[in-house]
Image: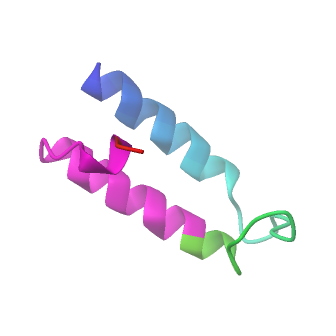
Amino acid sequence: MTKDLVDILYIVKAKFTDNSDMLWTSYETAKEVRDELTSYINQINKGDKSCLEI
């Protein structure tokens, strides 16, 4: 399951390009979103799933 989740996060991350419209988000730039997703990917790969908690 972890690999599937990480794969999905990589797909989502790739959707946020520098030209993405960020007005509908709480983020200023697409880079912020990509950085946050990278952080989640790294956590999950290390076995830390706390980022999945609500």
Q: How is the image coloured?
A: rainbow
Q: Is residue 15 above or below residue 26?
A: above
- Pick the residue in front: 6 or 25: 25
Looking at the picture, how far across and down is residue 22, in whole percent?
80, 69
**Is residue 41 within the magenta segment?**
yes
Q: Quadrant of the N terminus?
A: top left
Question: Looking at the image, which residue sits at the far bottom?
Answer: 28
Q: Is 9 left, or right, of 16 in this rendering?
A: left
Residue 14: within the magenta? no
Q: Left or right: 4 with respect to 48?
A: right
**Rendered residue at 56%/51% (across/down):** 13
Is 25 placed left or right of 53 in the picture?
right
Asked where in the image residue 30 lies, by quadrant, the reply is bottom right
Task: Give the residue displayed 37% in from the left and 23% down from the top.
Answer: 4
Q: Position of residue 50 (x, y in %)?
A: 25, 48
Q: Residue furthest left?
A: 46
In the rendered image, the vertical position of residue 7 relative to residue 24, given as above or below = above
Above or below residue 30? Residue 12 is above
Relative placement, left or right, of 48 versus 54 is left
User: Where in the figure is residue 49, as x and y percent of width and height?
Assistant: 23, 42
Q: Is residue 48 above or below residue 4?
A: below
Which quadrant would the C terminus be assigned to in this image? top left
- Residue drawn 20% across the image and 43% down it: 45
Magenta residues, as a range? 33-52
Q: Residue at x 45, y 65 (%)?
A: 36
Whole-percent x, y for residue 19 in the image:
81, 69
